[in-house]
Amino acid sequence: MKAIIDGLIVLPNEIINGHVIMYEKDIWRIVPRKQFRAGMCSEFIDANGGFVVPGFINEHIHGCAGADTMDDDDQALKTMQQALPATGVTSFVPTTMTMEQGRIEKALQRIRQAREDYQGGAQVLGAHMEGPFISPAYKGSQAEENIQTADFSWLESYADVIKIITLAPETLKNKKFLKDCQDHGITVSIGHTAADFDQAMECMDVLGHCHVTHLYNAMTPFHHRKPGVVGAALLNKHACCELICDDLHVHPAAQKLAYQMKGRDGLILVTDSLRACLQGDGESSLGGQKVFVKNGEARLADGTLAASIAPMNEVVLHFLINSGASIPEVVAMATVNPAKALGVYDRIGSLEEGKQADITILDSNDFHVKQTVIAGELAYNEEA
């Protein structure tokens, strides 16, 4: 048996002090310190007053540490798996780009293999397909020449691995594609879209519960006469919205507005990071396009803002500072909410007895990651 002591334990609705988490592969018990006996455990982690939170779940990430989901290299996902625990991430959904169909299929095959052949590090939960069924008008850093009309026939054989698909609803020939996704357990996320308010609301109504990919970015904005996708996302109580909180993609005031409109349960914090994350300034790439990173910004050659380079622990801290939300609420947006959206909340996403021991310890001052535990094993230790 192992134990984490002297930490501020962040539960979905509260922070508790003076308790000990006892675990092996799964969390066995969370007990008051006075009921704990050191002889019950052979290994200890002293949190030293840090926040003990569930391992972060990143449902939208292209790459980090020099590796990218679209790399035609079996080592790329392993590199990401090994690097992510230092950012507090214990599981993630590798995200594909709008590229040639063959490239996307190969990426899905690699993601499937990485999920099935787990060898340590952050766990792969499945794939997030960002495109190619998107709008050229809001392609962002996606390659326009590879945009396609939605066709479920070539996705069907990958339905076991695709967890989320980002698409532009106004480009669909009919609503059958949406039903096909639902029937196969794939979450549809509205994004990279030129849809107007009515088109977005119609899609949301058809889906019942839906996602919105990186709210505010790559979609029709809010205007008092044309509320756009942003207006629909903020008003629809069943829409769960991703938010990139690097303080570059979304202004702090817009982050606060999203929180006040959507509340704790309506937001999922993501990084949308590219391979340059954890790499510093210099030239990088995304989806076959050159990206230039300088002073914390990643842009294409034409100046278009590309993906983020912020790690998840910084994203969580930014939103905490900007939104006015409580620590349990903000942590839930990076743990509870993505776990529920991905259908894995019965196993991960919160610190509860019987759930997998995916645990991150954050410094209480600046949220840097001190230790990360995945399935009961120490995956990152800043002191090592």
Image (cartoon, grey):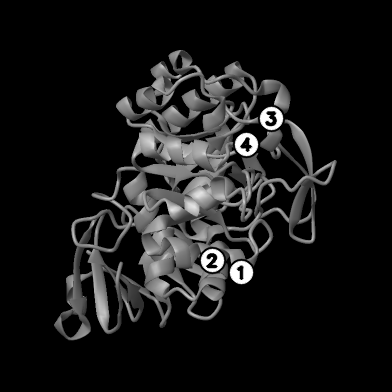
Disc 2 and disc 1 in contact, CB within 8 angstroms = yes
Residue on which the image places disc 1: 253
Disc 1 and disc 4 in contact, CB within 8 angstroms = no
Q: Is residue 132 left or right of residue 49?
A: right
Q: Which mark is residue 136?
A: 3
Q: Position of residue 327 (x, y in %)?
A: 42, 74
Disc 4 and disc 3 in contact, CB within 8 angstroms = no
Q: Secondary structure at mark 1?
A: helix
Around disc 4, counting alpha carbons within 10 Å, would you say few (fewer than 14), some (14 to 19), or many (20 or more)? many
Disc 2 and disc 3 in contact, CB within 8 angstroms = no
Find the distance from the CA under tag 2 to the CA under tag 3: 28 Å
Pick the residue in front: 379 or 258.
258
Say which quarter of the image contains residue 302.
Answer: top right
Residue on which the image places disc 2: 257
Label 2 vs 3, first from the N-terminus: 3
Around disc 3, counting alpha carbons within 10 Å, would you say few (fewer than 14), some (14 to 19), or many (20 or more)? some
Q: Position of residue 194 (x, y in %)?
A: 62, 36
Find the distance from the CA under tag 1 to the CA under tag 4: 24 Å
Q: Is residue 116 visible?
A: yes
Q: Is residue 173 left or right of residue 118?
A: right
Residue on which the image places disc 4: 194
Q: Secondary structure at mark 2?
A: helix
Query: Quick check: 223 above or below 195?
Result: below
User: The disc labelled 4 sits on which kind of residue?
Assistant: Ala
User: The disc labelled 3 sits on which kind of residue?
Assistant: Pro
Q: Residue at x 74, y 48 (%)?
A: 305
Pick the residue in front: 259 or 322.
259
Q: Position of residue 52 (x, y in %)?
A: 37, 71
